[in-house]
Image (spheres, grey):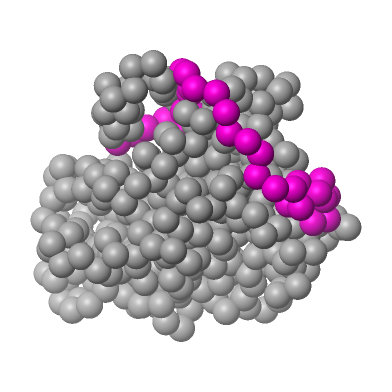
Amino acid sequence: MTTRTTSRATALAATGLLLTACGSGSGQAGPPSFEGRGPITYVAGKDTTGTVQPMLDRWNKAHPKEKVTFIQLPTDPDAQRQQMIQNAETKSDAYTVLSLDAVWTSEFAAHRWIDRLPEKRFPLGRMLKPVVETSRYRGGLYAVPGSSDGGLLYYRTDLLKKAGVARPPTTWAQMTAACAKVKRLPEAKGMSCYAGQFQKYEGLTVNFAEAVNSAGGTVTDPNGRPDVDTPEARKGLDFLARSFKDGTIPRKAITYLEEDGRQAFQSGKLVFLRNWPYAYSLAQRSGVKGKFATAPLPGLNGPGSSSLGGHNMAVSSSAGNKATALDFIKFMSSEDNTRTFLEDASVAPPYASLYDDKALIAQYPYLPVLKESILRAVPRPRVVQYGDVTSAVQQETYAALTGEKSSARALKDLQKALRKAVAL
């Protein structure tokens, strides 16, 4: 979700060269000693599911002298990141355990804002490999996966069936054609076809990267160099820009964050929605209960690629009571507790076994689709100056979606901006 959200993934993936470009040398040092016990804080984006505090209450009951206070930051991931950076730069001890968007881990490790962790304390071998990789920097472990995330296509099963559409779409063209059939139904009057996250924030970077990757393009090449000014990338951005222009995506979706799209889908305003798995349990409590399902994201010529989302838990370098912090991370990231978050809030777990659990699949039929989404996902750029990269992507993508620039012009300008952002 956005708070995890926020949390897709691509050939934006950067190499070790980029990861060391602003090298602090932190990746070379061994794990620090984790000493001190007492109260700590857990810092994360706003909990829209209502499941975090009950988990903290369990910890606090068992650890009355080491209680955890929940500090909730804004829903917007960009605002979360900025507040965490401000805390780190002032070396404040107000924040102890940070819930980082997976793509921020390298940036925070490179600047020594978080500590290197002792790997043997955590069951990383039981977690999905792509998820664990997001928590590493220069060979060291700097965070522990608390959740993963992959984008899903939510769709109205009742309307597709009534319109004679037998299967969910695997391509953008099929999705558009299915929408046309559904919108001819009386009960679909006033509905729009599709929406994702298109406000100028991290969600836009995710949706842009997914579109580019799903059209066969990349944002950076295998060596971490920007490679976004290509015919393939243009096809991906053109799909989004054209969809806004022809009404496939409603004009109001230019303001959508995760929650806006979820609420629109639940209130019957959308046939299709791109969102994270957290929306599943909430939709099951709404008016579309029993009327929707999930599928892999569609692409240009077949199933698309999600961005790799999720959140990692890290220890702030300036915090106190780090022995308590380490134990708390182990508690929150345990298989039992991540299973609870899955069952209560549809939060994607990092553990591979949970996606193959027959009892869970019977209760949450989207799990096989989600596992496929995560394993096929492409990471966003794991670069030290991630803020500059995502800001450039948002700026140029937004210009194309609002008609301020053509897709071709926006991509040329983005190529220049990314070269500057990742310059050594």
Residue 275 appears anywhere in the view:
no
* Overall secondary structure of the magenta section: loop
Q: Position of residue 133 (x, y in %)?
A: 56, 61
Residue at point 78%, 60% (across, down) = 18
Instruction: Reply above or below: 365 against 142.
Output: below
Q: Position of residue 329 (x, y in %)?
A: 44, 39
Quarter of the figure that contains the C terminus: bottom right
Please give the name of the residue rendered at 19% of the width and 69% of the height, measured from the top-left corner: 160
Q: Quadrant of residue 187?
A: bottom left
Residue 69 position, x and y percent, is: 42, 20
Magenta-colored stretch includes residue 17: no
Figure check: 264 above or below 82: below
Number of numbered markers: 0
Task: Locate residue 130, reporting x and y percent.
Answer: 50, 65
Horizontally, residue 265 falls left or right of residue 380, namely left
- Closer to us: 220 or 109: 109
Eyeballing the image, is 155 above or below 372? above
Highlighted range, magenta? 20-49
Q: Quadrant of residue 108?
A: top right
Which residue appears at 27% of the width and 48% of the height? Answer: 336
The answer to whether 199 appears left or right of 404 in the picture is left
Q: Nearer the viewer, residue 133 or 185?
A: 133
Which residue is drawn at the image coordinates 66% and 26% (left, top)?
318
Please name whichever residue, 207 or 82, is drawn nearer the observer in this view of the structure: 82
Check if residue 29 falls in the magenta segment. yes
Q: Quadrant of residue 115?
A: top right
